[in-house]
Amino acid sequence: MRNLLSLLVSLMLLGGAAGHLAAQTATPVISYNTQFHPTLARRGMVVSQDKHASEAGLEILRMGGNAIDAAVATGFALAVTHPQAGNLGGGGFMLIYLKSEDRVIALDYREMAPRAASRDMFLNAGGDVDNRRARFSMQSSGVPGTVMGLTDAQAKYGALPLSAVMAPAVRLADEGFIMNWALSASLSRYRERLGADPVSLKQYFKADGSPYQQGELFQQPDLAKTLTEIAAKGAAGFYQGWVADRIVETMKSSDGLIRHEDLLNYVAKERDAISGTFRDYSVVAMPPPSSGGVHVVQMLNVLEGWDLKSLGHNSASYIHRLTESMKYAYADRSKYLGDPDFFKVPITALTDKGYAGTIRGKIKLDAATPSTDIAPAPELPDESKDTTHFSTMDAAGNMVSNTYTLNFSYGNGRTVAGAGFLLNNEMDDFSAKPGTPNGFGLIGGVANAIEPGKRPLSSMTPVLLFKDGQPVMATGSPGGSTIITAVLQTVLNVMEFDMNAATATARPRIHHQWFPDRLILEPGHSVDTRLLLAAMGHSVSAVASYNEGERVLGATMTIIRRPDGLIAGSADPRRPGAYAAAY
Ligand code: GLY
């Protein structure tokens, strides 16, 4: 009844909209809600945080595009329809599996610190971190990598022309789309931050400054011009020419550091993926400057030494083992992880099964070890809020797992004048001062100190799973510091507990990140479990509130290729608007 009412209201509001939107207005508003039930398909699937974006990817699959084309179409569409994290002004990571070559490509398009950045740039006169400057000033922006990443992936591994792949995004920006509840509510929540920047105010709010309501048409003409330029010229349409001029002008209008030279020097990098195993699965994940891949594999190595299944999913004994593994991983993260181009990250040692055995040996099975008693390994064996994820898969078995971000929701809240896109505040992911927590409470050290040209450490964790040499699963999540643990639990739910995509997504999650010494439980864990964990010495906390004030841990977008060849997927129900589109 309520949905019917919403539909009628939106149809009334749209009474004057142009004819080409008639088809959209006929779509019931209920379909903008999370489509959580498992979707089954034969030929292809796209799962993302937004229905328009998933359908943009699906449109490209139907045209004969492959999973990479679909991912690029989805990435550009999210920049239009999910400005909380979908972006042109941010960066991210893409894992691509090419079935015909049986090869994984790990594409790093993380932002880079501009040339004028320096180690102590966010310290005030007293030597403390000025969080406002690190998070909301123009200096908080790193050189954006998304456009280079998406266009590189498309040029090398896509099958269709870029202009075709970007057509849905251009259309969504130019013709507009019907505002859904999720975006309308989010823009209202962030009215103050976005309203502080006159360009963002004009871009995301009505002429009178009020938020668009669910069911209203939302158009972004400046963004459409930028997308059209990129569609015609590729990355040069962003890193050179008038869009680059607008970025530099916007930087200079405040205290921003990005200049033409920084934009021209930006490169996306193909890196060696992190590989691990868990029982008879192969786990392939993103390497540094993502910390996610290293630590998911590290924790899986620790956990593999116990028969988790016999403990029971989400039993206190299982959660205890998960939690203790997380503490050791996040302690090591604080010391050993950074941009591998600037700091030698001991990947092999951290992902070594022997090292995991050492950690396992320290874990008491009946009592929590306080975080103050856990430190990053003094030495390792020698070397021998907001982000969004989408996954795609095609009939041939190609897969893409992509996580990208502006860092916080809407980044630093500043829009590039005349070009219509938001800037990131990814510089806050560096350690502005060793030992001082960043916006996600994460502690870092010299490995992640600010240096010109360096990429800040990330928690984004796109993952691919394989079994018997065959592609099995693509997944990943937003959630800042909680990304790594959300992805860990999702892959364990599939690999250890044999859950399908929907169940693996929906089961309640936990999170611990070493410091603060706090075990966070989502709703859905029993009171008995909570009491047992507290009795073991865990400091059990209320559920998380990292994600735009919602009480959730992560929002995974998962696709599984089943043994019978069917493709099954699930958008996470934790955040409204997510959608699995398939055919
Ligand atoms: N900006 C959050 C992350 O990259 O982990």
Image (cartoon, rainbow, N blue to C red):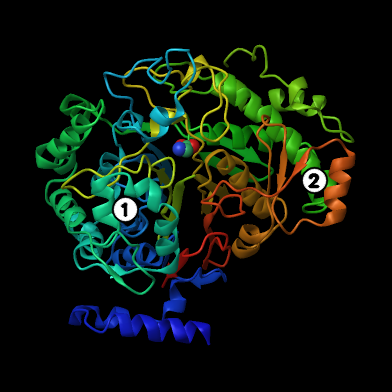
| Amino acid, disc 2 | Tyr
User: x, y (%) of residue 177?
Assistant: 29, 69
Say if mark 1 contacts mark 2, CB within 8 Å. no
Q: Is residue 234 above or below residue 252?
A: below
Residue bearing the label numbered 2: 318
User: x, y (%) of residue 100?
Assistant: 38, 50
Towards the viewer: 306 or 407 = 407
Asked whether the viewer can see residue 310, the reply is no
Q: Residue at x 38, y 83 (%)?
A: 9
The residue sitting at the front extreme is 208
**Side (left or right) of 181 relative to 196:** right
**Nearer-N-terminus badge (1/2):** 1
> How busy is the neighbourhood of tag 1: few (under 14 within 10 Å), some, or many (20 plus)?
many
Label 2 sits on a secondary structure element that is helix
Total numbered badges shown on the rendered structure = 2
User: x, y (%) of residue 401?
Assistant: 45, 49
Towards the viewer: 380 or 253 = 253
Q: Is residue 92 above or below residue 327?
A: below
Residue bearing the label numbered 1: 79
Q: Which mark is residue 418?
A: none
Label 1 sits on a secondary structure element that is helix
Q: Is residue 240 above or below residue 474?
A: above
User: x, y (%) of residue 363?
Assistant: 81, 29
Q: Residue at x 87, y 48 (%)?
A: 531
| Amino acid, disc 1 | Ala
Q: Quadrant of residue 259?
A: top left
- In whole angstroms, how far apart are the C-alphas of marks 1 and 2? 39 Å
Residue at disc 2, CB closer than 8 Å to ligand 1: no
**Side (left or right) of 241 relative to 182:** left
Nearer the observer: mark 1 or 2; the answer is 1
Towards the viewer: 442 or 344 = 442
